[in-house]
Amino acid sequence: MTSPERRFVISLGCPDATGIVARIGAFIADAGGWIVEAGYHTDPDTGWFFTRQEIRADSLPFDVDELRRRFSSVAEELGSRTSWRVWDTAQRRRVVILASKEGHCLHDLLGRIGSGELDVDLGAVISNHERLGPITRAHGVPFHHVPFPSDPEGKSAAFEQVRELAEKHDPHAIVLARFMQVLPPDLCERWLGRAINIHHSFLPSFAGARPYHQAYERGVKLVGATCHYVTAELDAGPIVEQDVMRVDHADAVPDMVRKGRDLEKLVLARGLRWHLEDRVLVYGKRTVVF
Amino acid sequence: MTSPERRFVISLGCPDATGIVARIGAFIADAGGWIVEAGYHTDPDTGWFFTRQEIRADSLPFDVDELRRRFSSVAEELGSRTSWRVWDTAQRRRVVILASKEGHCLHDLLGRIGSGELDVDLGAVISNHERLGPITRAHGVPFHHVPFPSDPEGKSAAFEQVRELAEKHDPHAIVLARFMQVLPPDLCERWLGRAINIHHSFLPSFAGARPYHQAYERGVKLVGATCHYVTAELDAGPIVEQDVMRVDHADAVPDMVRKGRDLEKLVLARGLRWHLEDRVLVYGKRTVVF
Amino acid sequence: MTSPERRFVISLGCPDATGIVARIGAFIADAGGWIVEAGYHTDPDTGWFFTRQEIRADSLPFDVDELRRRFSSVAEELGSRTSWRVWDTAQRRRVVILASKEGHCLHDLLGRIGSGELDVDLGAVISNHERLGPITRAHGVPFHHVPFPSDPEGKSAAFEQVRELAEKHDPHAIVLARFMQVLPPDLCERWLGRAINIHHSFLPSFAGARPYHQAYERGVKLVGATCHYVTAELDAGPIVEQDVMRVDHADAVPDMVRKGRDLEKLVLARGLRWHLEDRVLVYGKRTVVF
Amino acid sequence: MTSPERRFVISLGCPDATGIVARIGAFIADAGGWIVEAGYHTDPDTGWFFTRQEIRADSLPFDVDELRRRFSSVAEELGSRTSWRVWDTAQRRRVVILASKEGHCLHDLLGRIGSGELDVDLGAVISNHERLGPITRAHGVPFHHVPFPSDPEGKSAAFEQVRELAEKHDPHAIVLARFMQVLPPDLCERWLGRAINIHHSFLPSFAGARPYHQAYERGVKLVGATCHYVTAELDAGPIVEQDVMRVDHADAVPDMVRKGRDLEKLVLARGLRWHLEDRVLVYGKRTVVF
């Protein structure tokens, strides 16, 4: 995303076998492709192979659609019908953010977008509270307030409204930036692999509500944050990134909350960047992050 | 600053001797003071003693001026004529930020102030470029553009203008948030202990210009950032906070720059918080951070 | 323990009240005591106060027994009948280690003792396997092999033998250095506050058996280690120290095991040092570590 | 080294060009080779390409000598006459350690070798002091005491003796485990790429003598350790690994020394492992670590 030069990025998962590297390498070399970054991984448990390759766009004599068309035969040959993607870095990523009252993650993402560090199209911020409207609009981003009633029907209708507002942008990522509402299972399913959440604990410890309180009561010496894909099982989706920060006995819950915010911002920003750069390949509950 | 309750904070440095803890403890106890946080340190090399104490304001039968008046005799008794301070957390800190074109540190501080995490009066942002004006004003903060010509006289006049604009706010902290201009010696002297800078390296390595380039050329495996008080000797002032981040051979200079921004933001924000909470006591080139 | 000079160390927990710091400070000052390190903490939830003070032994006109006698009235006055201790750093700590087949923690502790870094009397190493006998004896430390049968009676008798062998040394710490046997409840009770364990995960995640396998299956991005006091509830005792280390998709379980060993060694060594230096005060499931 | 299965490891540096990955991939695939780990890196500044590949030995129909013979044509084709290597993990690495009086790094390496974590042939420990003889011999390793006089001739003769003792083992690594003597230029040249040192600072800060004292005086908030190849310029060789650890105002020099030991042990052990596993490729002052 900060690449000064345009690149085509191939990501693929397929059953492991001898000669995959050579097959893909030959495909790229035959087209004159200049590989500027390449990652490979074999998972011995599942016998699955993963790769991600960045090719200089100007080294290829055709455009990304043609690359996609040609590569589809290679992928099929390798037994990967659906688990491959080709991305042209010149095609900007579209993002929608869901937020609530807590603004630190939103402020951080807006700052990264505003300073050009995160070069994406932020289509909208949707929130169940008004509070973050002014700062969102000050960044020139549309803000939608969707109140969430506490009754199931009202909530269901609110989620339907969120869905519509979000999907209008055909987003590559729907970011739950401390959204505080549990997505209904059908939305989890619908947005699988695109809805990305930040949870304020080092999962699997302290899933669910009030993780800093849980951490305080258990007396841990580090608190953490986890960026993960949203699945129907709460806080149990594939983990993209995690980090921790030291606390000690002098840190009461409000101190943990304050310190933890910096973690949440960093971990979410890193996870989101990797997701948008097609660096994350999911298999089961695990992720390869190239 | 995030303390829910009002506190009086005493900070003191004095020659070490037997009975200092008892003397201060008795002074506070005699007034009925409830100590909620206390730090002590003796530096064996210099024979100097340091302490910082947070007292619940509502546990004392008098206000902060009276506390200051009474404590001054204790401080004098202990041989500390000038190196002590008393701060009432209800008195909000005043801050001025100097910036240039790079916005990440400014965005971060504005976000922290906007979300209420950093509860200060930001009087003004002063910059030698226009670029950060809109976002500053969107946060409701006055922005002053002071162009810096390259000739010595022009530069000198520009600094004089910066000085006037900054001092109008009688700031507790003048934050050089990637300001990129070297303060003249007289301003360093004048703002000693109040001008706080973020340098994008793990000092003393890579002082001066283009530290990420220097780091890249040396082939280090971690890059860092340093928050320090500004002194006349470039990048050599007392260090308040530092941190590092892992890089590897795949990280070219632009990657270091991008990753390093997160470090700079965090390290500056932590250092500034500690400075404003009167947690930092300087002695020579070293600091005690309670 | 590495202090070049002899010190008397007071640790105390008591109900919080105004004037405790002054009371203890006056007690020490009246005796001419020179405080070289002091820590204070108030837990707002429980209303309990904690302190630890290091006093230069040569600054007091009496020995440690007299200090203990005199301080007992202060402690009683402050409502702390049993939760205070006075330690003379000239009295070397006695340690017993329980090990099994995995040698890395034992090797590490023997190395620290052998190089003088950890200045303790290691009375014995007790193991349910022979394997670590030679290296233990090469360090001049008695090694006892106590086989653990799988039947309950045999196991019970084995634990009785371990108890006798350990208690002969009247140890300040019984270190479970990857002992792999679950202490029976009566022994947990008997050794409460002295039995210290290293668990190879970032608790409370992955308690119980095969934590690295659990971590691998969950796909976490960091693995950890936890040093905690042993209680009857498995892996749920008060935590003394924790740390983590980054892993990625390329790390299979054996890599996690290998990398994790370094963590286990460090975390156990730090936790043990703090325990032996009387820096750890337990309250409920939490610890203050001064 | 902890690989359960035998592998052949190819490391190569060559001028970057289109098709290298395909060329090497085809070579391996044509022989039926099963790649279990692969790393690639292109350095844009120097236009140099680097790769390291691990192939399951039992997937190839020939032995390592034949692999080396065949690969040499590929390497030549790619313009890499001398900067490639093929290693058979079944061929154990030979190591010689140079030590002085400080035992922590030696204890640590002996422990890792003794517990089987580091599966190497430790041919000898050579020291200018007697102190570490007993523990070395207790591990069944030959120990040579070579006294170092202070006069140049005596020192020169001592180095000649060290050279002979070391080279008798034809070592893949000569480890300066806090050796404290500066290797003469001719020995640096002779052992280039094999002599590996641990320096107790975060280089390039605090090169030379007494780095912890330098760090203390500068008032840094983190101390570090650096594992690097030895070159004629003191503490300026290519860096293999670095790490840091937080210190604060309460840490005097002896505390830094004590805490730093853990860093030195870890950083040296990691650097040595990577070197022995042929993961480190040097170019200029920089290293690729796969």
Image (spheres, coloured by chain):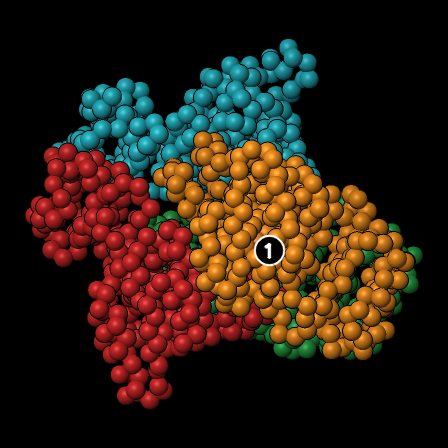
Chain colours: A red, B orange, C green, D cyan
The local secondary structure at tag 1 comes to strand
Q: Which residue position holds label 1?
A: B96
Give me the chain letter of mark 1. B
**Residue B76 showing in the rendered view:** yes
Q: For the point 49% across and 42% down, which residue is it?
A: B223
Which is nearer the eye, A71 or A265? A265
Q: On the image, which quarter does residue B21 sit in? A: bottom right
Above or below — where is C113 with respect to C168? above
Above or below — where is A129 with respect to A41? below
Give the crowd class for mark 1: few <14, some 14-19, many >=20 residues within 10 Å.
Answer: many
Which is nearer the eye, C183 or B206? B206
Residue D145: horizontal and vertical position, in percent? 61, 24
Total numbered badges shown on the rendered structure? 1
User: In the rendered structure, which amino acid carries the disc numbered 1?
Assistant: Val
Residue C261: horizontal and vertical position, in percent? 47, 50
- From the viewer's perspective, tell me whether residue A234 is left or right of residue B263: left
Above or below — where is D151 with respect to C216? above
Q: For the point 39% across and 27% down, which residue is it?
A: D283
Q: For the point 29% across and 58% down, which residue is it?
A: A121
- From the viewer's perspective, tell me whether residue D139 is left or right of residue D58: right
Q: For the point 27% across and 22% down, which residue is it?
A: D80
Which is nearer the eye, B40 or A136? A136
Which is nearer the eye, D3 or A171? A171
Q: On the image, which quarter does residue B50 sit in? A: bottom right
Residue C247: horizontal and vertical position, in percent? 39, 51
- From the viewer's perspective, tell me whether residue B95 is left or right of residue A105: right
**Residue C82 showing in the rendered view:** no
